[in-house]
Image: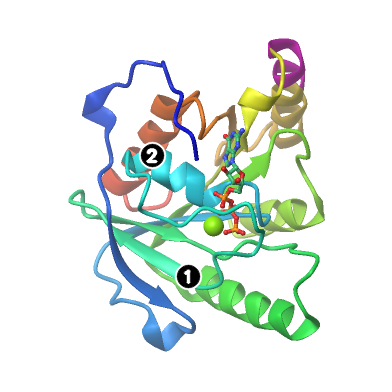
C-alpha cells in the first residue's frame, strides 16, 4: 500500500510489533501470557493495512487487493506486554460454504474462549459501515460487555463533509455505551492514528476490561 502520510506522529504512542505465530485452530494459539487486542472486520475493510500503519511496519501483516487473503488468526508480539491479533476477514462473497463455516468456527472460538482478549478493534470501510456482520459483532460486544473501538477506515476516500456525516451517524449508532467508541481512520494517510493507539495502549496498561 502506498504510504503518503504527511501527518506528524506522536512517537511516544508507537506500537512496534513482530510476527509471533499463525493459528488455524485453538490448539495453535500461543499461551495466554499477556493482554490481546484483536482486529476484526469485513474482508477488504483494511485490517492488515491498519495493523501495518499502527506498527509503522508495512511488511507486518500481508495486505491485498484480493479479499480473503488473511485466512488464519495471526498473532503479533509487542514489547509492551500486549499482543495484536489479526482475525480473518468475514463476508468474502466468493468463499465456499465450507470456508465460511471454518471461518465462523475459528473466529467464534477465539472471541468466546480467549481470556486474554481485552479489547476489539472493528475495522469498517467508511463508505459501507455497519454491514450485517459488523452489526452482529457489535451486538456480541454489547451483550458480552466487551470494549470495542470502531475504525471508519479508508477515510481518505471521502471528502471532509461526507466523512464527518458518517462519523456523526456512527456516533449516534453507539451512543450511550461507555465501552464503545468510533473514530475516523485512514491506513493510507495516517488520519486518526494517535487516537486508536491511545485506546490500545490503555487496554495494554489496564488489562481488566474497560
Ligand atoms: N485508500 C485506502 N485504501 C486502503 C486503506 N486501507 C486499506 N486499503 C486498501 O484496501 C485493500 C484491502 O486491504 P487489506 O489491509 O488487505 O484488508 P483486510 O481487511 O486485511 O482484508 P482480508 O485480509 O481479506 O480480510 C488493499 O488494496 C489496501 O491497500 C485506506 O485507509 N485507504
Ligand atoms: Mg488481512
| In the displayed structure image, the side of residue 157 where residue 194 appears, left or right | left
Q: Residue 200, percent across and down? A: 38, 42
Does the image show residue 210?
no
Residue at the image point whose x is 75% and y is 28% from the top: 172
Q: Residue 69, percent across and down? A: 58, 64
Residue 12's mark?
Answer: none
Extreme residue toward the left, this view: 79
Residue at the image point whose x is 50% and y is 25% from the top: 189
Task: Look at mark 1 in the image and give the residue it sits on.
Answer: 73
Task: Look at mark 2 in the image and give the residue it sits on.
Answer: 54
For the residues marked 1 and 2, what is the alpha-carbon distance in whole angstroms? 18 Å
Closest to the observer: 145 or 119?
119
Q: Which residues are magenta?
A: 160-165
Does the image show residue 136?
yes
Q: Residue 36, percent across and down? A: 37, 59
**Tag 1 near tag 2, CB within 8 Å:** no
Q: Is residue 105 magenta?
A: no
Instruction: Give the mark nearer the N terminus: 1 vs 2.
Output: 2
Vertical arrangement, residue 125 with respect to residue 5, above or below: below
Amino acid at each position: 500500500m502506498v504510504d503518503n502520510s504527511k501527518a506528524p506522529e506522536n512517537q511516544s504512542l508507537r506500537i512496534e510489533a513482530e510476527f509471533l505465530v499463525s493459528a488455524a485452530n485453538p490448539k495453535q494459539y500461543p499461551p495466554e501470557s499477556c493482554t490481546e487486542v484483536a482486529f476484526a472486520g469485513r474482508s477488504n475493510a483494511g485490517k492488515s493495512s491498519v495493523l501495518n500503519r499502527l506498527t509503522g511496519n508495512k511488511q507486518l501483516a500481508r495486505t491485498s487487493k484480493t479479499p480473503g487473503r488473511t485466512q488464519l488468526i495471526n498473532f503479533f508480539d509487542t514489547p509492551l506486554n500486549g499482543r495484536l491479533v489479526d482475525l480473518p476477514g468475514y463476508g468474502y462473497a466468493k468463499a465456499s460454504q465450507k470456508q465460511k463455516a471454518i471461518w465462523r468456527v475459528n473466529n467464534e472460538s477465539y472471541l468466546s474462549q480467549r481470556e486474554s482478549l481485552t479489547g476489539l478493534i472493528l475495522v469498517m470501510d467508511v463508505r459501507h459501515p455497519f454491514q450485517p456482520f459488523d452489526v452482529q459483532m457489535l451486538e456480541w460486544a454489547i451483550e458480552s460487555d466487551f470494549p470495542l473501538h470502531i475504525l471508519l477506515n479508508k477515510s481518505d476516500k471521502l471528502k471532509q463533509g461526507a466523512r464527518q456525516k458518517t462519523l456523526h451517524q456512527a456516533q449516534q449508532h453507539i451512543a450511550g455505551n461507555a465501552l464503545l467508541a468510533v473514530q475516523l481512520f485512514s491506513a493510507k494517510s495516517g488520519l486518526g492514528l494517535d487516537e486508536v493507539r491511545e485506546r490500545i495502549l490503555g487496554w495494554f496498561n489496564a488489562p481488566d476490561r474497560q
